[in-house]
Image: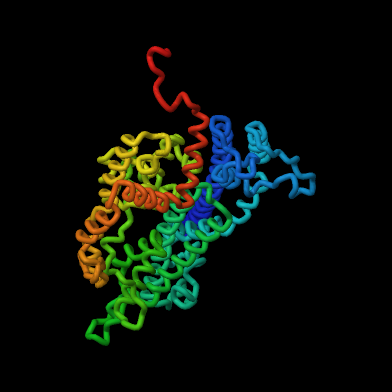
Amino acid sequence: MQTEVVTNVFDGHLAQWVAFAIAFVTTFALIFGRYEIRLRRLRLIRDYVKAFPVWGDSDSGTETTNPSFEFVRSKYAADIRGNGEDGEKDPPDLTPRSTEAIVREINDTIAKTRFFLNRGDARLLMASLPYMLVVFTGFSLTFSANTCPVAADGCFQQFAHNLLTVGGMNLTSETAPEQYRQLAQNVLTIAAITFVGAYLSSLRYLIQALSVFDLSGYTVIRQAAVITIAVFASAILYRALPEPMKALSFLGGTTSETVKDLSTGWILTALAFGLLPGTVLQFVLVKIGTLFDWIKQSDDRFIQWTRVVPLDAIDGIDFFTRFRLEECGISDVQSLATYNPIMLHIETPFGIYQTVDWIAQAQLCCVVGLDRFLLLRQFNVRTIFDLERALKQNKESMSDEERKAIDRFDRIYAAVLLAPTGPLKALQEKSPAKFLIPDANGSDIKEVDASEFSIWAMKTISSNDDMASKAIEHLMDWIGDDLHVRRLRRLWNEISDRLGPTSLELTPDRKV
């Protein structure tokens, strides 16, 4: 008997040491990974500055740094103290900003964060202590429940004698009912399974935050709170309803006098609470809300026509590339269209030209819709700038024949942009709102369907070639005036300027 007690105590200590090792290694690996990612990406930012310009002339004639680049650089230097924060003199004014000046600033940032556990890392380590404590406690519970018998005076007592499981009853007493022992075991098992699921979910969340350098003290503390809430919620739910049929006893359900072993349903429910804590709760609330008329409901009549456009629609993005982009928080075409191209290049293994091309495609898809985007691709228009170049040309130096030819081309693309798509037809049929157009005499207004409305719109702007050209250029002006399109246009122009005039066309053989 003494040997058995010693073995149980040793197993309990071993379980706690293993739990502490897991908690420490997890936290340390996350912080060290953040440190390595910062150094590597700061060096990538420095190399980008050397290869491409990040400044340009403003309207006032002074040189200004590209705001897109400044956002990327500040993201990786925000928690590093500058000279002014330590009471020292601020660095000298470096305007106009040259490449050497910007590289010097980045090298200074790298020097301040070169050593592991600098001030930023130390602050993050302090903020990670609650997460480390929660992980240690959870794995101690998980491993102890597997190594300690119910009736032993070992580590099981640390968790069994509490108000949550059996109301604080001493389970080691010989008079303790067997069903309370079983109930305590089941509650602890539910808590352990939920913890394991929540721990794996937190790892996935923290690694995703690490990949986009969004791992902060708030992120880690939030995961500690999510794990704690999920474990307590699942344990309390099982404690209240160990057998769900008891809740239906007033409808004729049968009750049980003894507590049984855990069912497969409860094990899967506990795992779901851990892996998807917020999703499970939200699903339950939504389903309950549909049973009551006094709860405000969502209008889902058009949900099949308002679905997100997947990244696979972009030329060059396959399943594996889509998975990699989703790690950066880019889950659909709209989020790709508004993403910073320089940041996407720095945070992923894809080149700057590739990211610019993908974002330009996504911007075209967002403004014209997926149907027209695929149609325009068949007419050799892949990006928002292809459409802009096709519709907006400097016609002042052209002859009349050249101008007329381009005007005809504008009408061709206008027909594509005004084409009635499947979603447009379906929405017009399902919605009580109808299109209104004047009749042939212009004296009366009538309701029409989507196809007739598109034909009328095309005829309205096609009275002559000049009107059609101006109308379609006006359309291009407003669909290309978003801030994220302007940002990409500036980057496009800066890279084009750096490539020089020799990139505009192939050199003829006679010049070679």
Q: Count the marks: how many?
A: 0
Q: Which corner quadrant holds the C terminus?
A: top left
Residue at 20% over, 64% down: 440
Pinpoint residue 346: horizontal percent, then vertical percent: 50, 39
User: In the visual, does 247 lie left or right of 497?
Assistant: left
**For residue 280, which quarter of the picture?**
bottom left
Q: Is residue 396 above or below residue 190?
A: above
- Residue lying at the far bottom in this picture: please name it: 250
Pinpoint residue 377: horizontal percent, then vertical percent: 28, 41
Which residue is at the front of the view, 202 or 258? 202
Which residue is at the front of the view, 75 or 482? 482
Give the color scheme: rainbow, by chain, secondary structure or one colour. rainbow
Pinpoint residue 160: horizontal percent, then vertical percent: 47, 69
- Residue lying at the far right in this picture: please name it: 88
Residue at 44% over, 26% down: 503
Pinpoint residue 469: horizontal percent, then vertical percent: 34, 47
Which residue is at the front of the view, 362 or 2? 362
Can I make out residue 423 in this image? no
Can I make out residue 24 in this image? yes
Q: Is residue 236 above or below residue 80?
A: below
**For residue 315, which quarter of the picture?**
top left
